[in-house]
Amino acid sequence: MAVAAGVYLVLRLAGCHQLFVNDAEGRGTLLEIIGTLYRVVYAFATYVIWGQLAAVENERLKESGALRDLVLFSKGLKEAHVIPPSAPYAPTPAQSRSRNGECSPEARTAGGPTS
């Protein structure tokens, strides 16, 4: 802002404003055209941003509904059946069977069936 005011002051003191005194109508028309273009671009940007905002709001509503359903349906589960996300994965004895049907040594020590 200060730079624009400085440039204006320098051009005014240099007498450059006298070059455009007779063309005030042309300058007014040019300013109207620039203003119209600015309004069109601003309206388009507002429309695009508003559309993206609506899409984000719809996704948020879907996700919050899914989370609400998850909380409601998980209230009936016992705490023993819920595996915390920080627990390392340990296969159950049934998952530890090899292709030929024999139990792995880990399943045997865990009390799995011996075939």
Image (cartoon, rainbow, N blue to C red):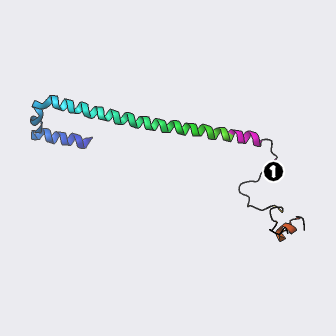
Query: Is the N terminus in the top left, top right, bottom left or bottom right quadrant?
Result: top left
Magenta region, main secondary structure: helix
The residue indicated by pointer 1 is 81
Q: Residue at x 21, y 33 (%)?
A: 30
Magenta highlight on residue 80: yes
Judge from the rendering whether residue 89 lies leftward or rightward of residue 59; answer left or right.
Answer: right
Q: Amino acid at mark 1?
A: His
Q: Residues within 10 Å of mark 1 (few under 14, many from 20)?
A: few
Judge from the rendering whether residue 69 lies leftward or rightward of residue 30; answer left or right.
Answer: right
Q: Position of residue 103 (x, y in %)?
A: 85, 68
Q: Residue at x 76, y 41 (%)?
A: 73
Looking at the image, the residue that sits furthest to the top is 25
Q: Nearer the viewer, residue 62 or 102?
A: 102
Query: Is the C terminus in the top left, top right, bottom left or bottom right quadrant?
Result: bottom right
Q: Position of residue 67 (x, y in %)?
A: 67, 41
Report the span colored magenta. Answer: 68-82
